[in-house]
Amino acid sequence: MDADAPYSQIVYLVFAPDVVGKAIVCSLARKFDLEFNILKAQITPRQEGAMTLELSGSAAAFQAGLDFLRDQGLKVSPAAQRITRDEASCMHCGVCTSLCPARALHLDRVSREVVFESEKCTTCGLCTQVCPVGAMQARIENGAEEAAEDA
């Protein structure tokens, strides 16, 4: 991979209670020239934090940013799932559209069908929990499964 090539990846961060209050993510922009988009964030009652974050920048800056996050005591892992839709099963009821925070699912006003824009999906999984027919599915990406699908 070219170190200066544009790069973007969704990562999952876990913050220990002693780092929850620090402006660590903002440092990614200042120190490493990375753009970040917070897709989902929460702090538990025990003051532990979890965040799904999209990071964009050069591949070298991305790697340096990940190293920085780990040095600050955060657990960092790539988003390990993606959301897919079984087109044959979807009955276009629209239940999923009301819960999608990224607006990756929306109702086409002309066709009255649910449109799924997977590139906007943040893999929060809310749609998979409410789909009455199971058309929305979380798929674990592990390399082998993806290779088998492409074959």
Image: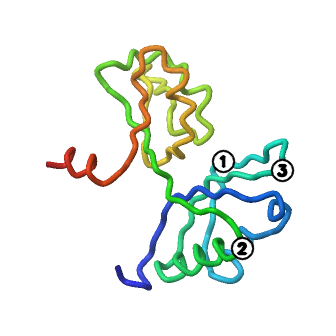
Tell whether label 3 touches label 1 (CB within 8 Å): no
At 46% from the left and 50% from the top, the residue drawn is 80
At 69% from the left and 83% from the top, the residue drawn is 31
Which badge, 1 or 3, is on the more N-terminal residue?
Answer: 1
Closer mark to the observer between disc 2 and disc 1: 2
Q: Nearer the viewer, residue 117 or 36?
A: 36
54 left or right of 81 in image: right
Where is residue 12 shown, x and y percent of the image?
58, 55
Where is residue 7 shown, x and y percent of the image?
45, 71
Q: How is the image coloured?
A: rainbow
Q: What label sits on residue 40 in the rendered view?
A: 1
34 left or right of 145 in image: right
Q: Nearer the viewer, residue 111 or 72?
A: 72
Q: Nearer the viewer, residue 118 or 146?
A: 146
Q: What label sits on residue 117 in the rendered view?
A: none
Q: Which of the 4 image quadrants contains residue 114?
A: top left
- Crowding near the residue tagged with mark 3, few <14, some 14–19, many ≥20 C-alpha atoms within 10 Å: some
Q: Amino acid at mark 1?
A: Lys
Tell whether label 1 touches label 2 (CB within 8 Å): no
Instruction: State the SS at label 2.
Output: loop
Q: Is residue 132 above or below residue 106?
A: above
143 left or right of 37 in image: left
Which badge, 2 or 1, is on the more N-terminal residue?
Answer: 1
Q: Amino acid at mark 3?
A: Gln
Tell me the residue that label 2 is attached to: 72
Which badge, 3 or 2, is on the more N-terminal residue?
Answer: 3
Where is residue 103 shown, x and y percent of the image?
56, 38
Q: Amino acid at mark 2?
A: Gln
- Crowding near the residue tagged with mark 1, few <14, some 14–19, many ≥20 C-alpha atoms within 10 Å: some
